[in-house]
Amino acid sequence: MSALDTSTPVLLLGGRENALAVARNLGRLGVTIYSSGKPGSRSMDSKYCTQAFIVPEGTEAADHWHDLLLANPTSKLQGCIVFACCDESLDFLQSNRDQLAEHYKLEEFVPEQRRTMLNKQATLEIAGRIGVPAPAYWEINSDEDVEKIRDQVRLPVMVKPLDSFAFVHEFGAKLFIVDTVFDDVVEKVKLARSRGQEVMVVEMIPGPDDLLSSYYTYRTADGRRLYDYTKSVIRRWPVNRGGACFHQSEWLPETAEMGQKLFDGVDWHGIGNVEFKRDTRDGQLKIIEVNARFTAAHRLVTAAGAPIDEIIYRHLTDQEIPEFESYSNKLRMIYPIGDFMAYLELRQSKQLSLLGWLKTVCAQQAVVPDFSFGDPYPALAEWALIVRRGFGKLFCIFRR
């Protein structure tokens, strides 16, 4: 394998622990790293970040990036690789692909294809057409459509946006979950539509969080897969509805096969990640959602021996790509605070004892997403922010 030519810089747009992991991995290899995002974007705090371009308070990130890269381009960024690390930057790259490609290196992707697959309803429709099982869902085109499905829906369900980025921007949440009363489904749909958000109703696949798994790949314009990687989830917090707080790196042939079937079926280009959950009612893996960027579990992926960011970097700079066939099936990644909160929730419902939790935490080697002895500041900054928020809440309570 030839030595890595690190002369092409990388610009990371947005993101949190995923962008931080990319900055550290490529930075250690000698790649110059630039980062741009809102305050709190962790890669901007890393020692591997040569320069941070902070999105000013009150400015939309997309407007700042347009000015930074297109309207008044910074000369040092010319020719760099631009990676989107959040939904907002994905949308920015999709909307400005042709202009950006004249001055920067981008992943191979077809904007309309990516935009379609990041539409949650379109994802389920396309998956069904190519033979990838999906949960039951109901299309909502008017407030009246909700009443028509009252007798078909079994709770709990999700009121899920077709466009996650716009929904999060409006509500500060990825979706609404309704557990017990169908009238709440009607209310949430009307609320979303009144704010201009198109939504659908999707069943929640029953069963614990350890039935979740994900497949990762990069598919070139000529259909080659540069790598295949899978992982599973051990716990999420909040339980059965939140983000994963405990992951396991492991090769899952069925998850990989189903992911390959999906991406081959749509002729996907670029970074691809798809999440599945096994339905205990029929034993099938069913698609949850598709992502087109490095995920929050990126630290786990690369620490397990799957150097996917280096592979993509080499590909985009026309360098020899290392052989990649195996990785650790025993490494885990834990969010200590989130996983402890998950344990408390599971203990309350008598699903997990203290001993059982400790056994899972201590069973295998684990990494954490933020902290690194060689690059401690991003984690310290994050913890300081958590403490400030905590004291802020206490101050508000005592002032009452």
Image: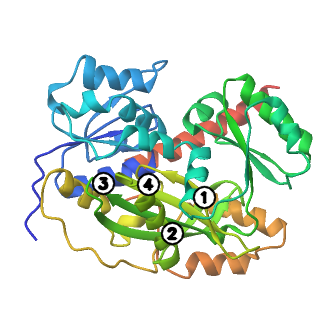
- Determine whether, in the image, residue 314 is placed left or right of residue 156: left
Q: Residue 134: in sight, yes or no?
A: yes
Q: From the image, tell me which residue sits under label 2.
A: 258
N-terminal of the pair, mark 3 or mark 2, is 3
Q: Position of residue 377 (x, y in %)?
A: 38, 47
What residue is at 44 percent from the left and 34 percent from the top? 91
What residue is at 40 percent from the left and 69 percent from the top? 229
The amino acid at mark 3 is: Arg
Disc 3 crowd rating (10 Å Cα; few below 14, some 14-19, many 20+) is many
Q: Position of residue 5 (x, y in %)?
A: 9, 55
Q: Secondary structure at mark 3?
A: helix
N-terminal of the pair, mark 4 or mark 3, is 3
The Cα atoms of the two marked residues, 2 and 1, are separated by 12 Å
Q: Quadrant of the N terminus?
A: bottom left
Q: From the image, tell me which residue sits under label 4.
A: 266
- Check residue 24 in the rendering and tell me which mark sits there, or answer none: 3
The amino acid at mark 1 is: Gly
Q: Position of residue 51 (x, y in %)?
A: 25, 35
The amino acid at mark 2 is: Met
In the image, 362 versus 261, the foreground residue is 261
Relative to 83, say whether 308 is above or below: below
Tags 2 and 1 touching, CB below 8 Å? no
Snapshot colouring: rainbow
The amino acid at mark 4 is: Val
Q: Secondary structure at mark 4?
A: loop
- Name the front one of labels 3 and 2: 2
Relative to 129, say whether 61 is above or below: above
The Cα atoms of the two marked residues, 3 and 2, are separated by 31 Å
The Cα atoms of the two marked residues, 4 and 1, are separated by 12 Å
- Determine whether, in the image, residue 114 is placed left or right of residue 36: right
The Cα atoms of the two marked residues, 4 and 3, are separated by 32 Å
Q: From the image, tell me which residue sits under label 1.
A: 128
